[in-house]
Amino acid sequence: MVEVSQEVPESIGDTMSNRKNIVVLGPPGAGKGTQCEKISETYDIPHISTGKMLREHKDLETEHGTARDYMEKGDLVPDRVVYRILDHRLEKNDTKQGFVLDGFPRDMEQAKHLEERRELDLVISLEVDQEEIMVRLTGRRVCEDCGESFHIKFRPPEEEKVCDECGGDLIHRDDDKREVIEERLEEYRNKTLPLKEFYNDKDLLEEVDGNGSIEEVWKKTRQTLEETL
Ligand code: AP5
C-alpha cells in the first residue's frame, strides 16, 4: 500500500536520454492496466495506476464524502486527493528513468498538474469499440488482495475465483456494474477525450487500435513504443 503526503515532488531534469515518461489514455475497460503491465515489465519502469492507488485508499476523506463514494458512482475523485497520492508516488526514486501512468490525467486540470511535474515522452490512446468495453468489464475479475486483473473468458485464472499470483479471492469490481460503467464512459467522453487533442497538438499522441486479443494489442502497442521512443 502506498503512503500519502502533501509534498510536491521536484521536477526531474530532461537529461536522461533513455527516459520513458509514458501516459496511457483510453476509456474504462480499454485494456490500459493490461497493456501498462506489459510496458512496465518490458522497459523496467513502474506502472502507476491512480485507480489502483485510490482503491487502496478508498476511505480517504474528501470535502464531500470518501473516495469510495465517488468511485462507486463512476465519478472522478476530487483532484486534491488524487494529487496527494500521485505526487507522493512520483517522488520515489524508481520513477527517475520513467514510468507508465494509467488513469491519469483524466481531465485538463490534471494534465496541467502533470505538466508542471514531469515532461512526457509519449501518450498512447487505446481505441476500443463500446460493445467490446462492456464485454471486457462485465467479465473482469480482480484479486481482492493484490489487484491482479483477470477475465472469465479472455484471461481466466487457472482455478476458478482464485488469483494465480497470490491465491487471493477474485471479485467483480463494484464499479463494473452496467449502470456504473455507463457513468464512467460518460465521464471519459466529457472530460478525458479532449486530452487527445491537447497531446496531439504537442506531438505526443499515438493512437493504438485496442480491439483484438491481449497479445494482438500488445504487438501493436510495442511497435508504437519502438517506433516513437
Ligand atoms: P480505473 O481503475 O483507472 O478505471 P478505468 O479507467 O475505468 O479503467 P479500468 O481499470 O476499468 O480498465 P482498463 O482500461 O485498465 O482495462 P483492463 O486492462 O483492466 O479508475 C477507477 C475509478 O477510480 C474511476 O472511475 C474514478 O472514480 C477513480 N479515478 C481513477 N483515476 C482517477 C483520476 N486520475 N482522477 C479522479 N478519479 C480517478 O481490462 C479490462 C478487462 O478486459 C480485464 O478483465 C482484462 O483482462 C480484459 N482485457 C484487457 N485487454 C483485453 C483484450 N485485448 N482482449 C480481451 N480482453 C482484454
Image: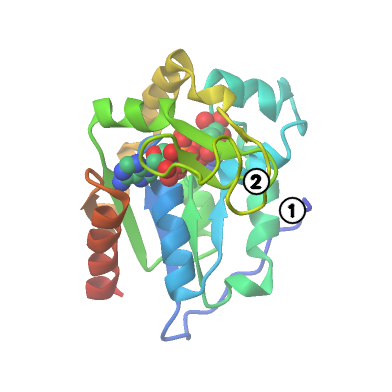
Where is residue 176 shown, x and y percent of the image? 49, 25
The residue positioned 22% from the left and 60% from the top of the image is 220
Where is residue 49 shown, x and y percent of the image? 55, 50
Does the image show residue 108? no
Where is residue 222 shown, x and y percent of the image? 29, 66
Q: Quadrant of residue 82?
A: top right
Q: Residues within 10 Å of mark 2 (few under 14, many from 20)?
A: some
Apparent side of residue 140 relative to residue 203 in the rendered image (left or right): right
Describe the element under mark 1 as helix, strand or loop: loop
The circle drawn on residue 2 is 1
Contact, CB < 8 Å: mark 1 with mark 2? Answer: yes
195 is higher (above) or lower (below) than 222: above
The circle drawn on residue 53 is 2
Describe the element under mark 2 as helix, strand or loop: helix
The residue positioned 25% from the left and 25% from the top of the image is 131
Q: Earlier in the sequence, mark 1 or mark 2?
A: 1
Apparent side of residue 224 relative to residue 33 in the rendered image (left or right): left
Apparent side of residue 131 relative to residue 29 in the rendered image (left or right): left
Q: Quadrant of the C terminus?
A: bottom left
Q: Residue furthest front?
A: 159
Q: Amino acid at mark 1?
A: Val
The circle drawn on residue 141 is none
Q: Amino acid at mark 2?
A: Met
23 is higher (above) or lower (below) than 171: below
Does the image show residue 146? yes
Some atom of ligand 1 lies within 8 Å of the CB belonging to the residue at label 1: no
Q: Residues within 10 Å of mark 1 (few under 14, many from 20)?
A: few
Query: How far is the residue under mark 1 from the one under mark 2?
Result: 7 Å
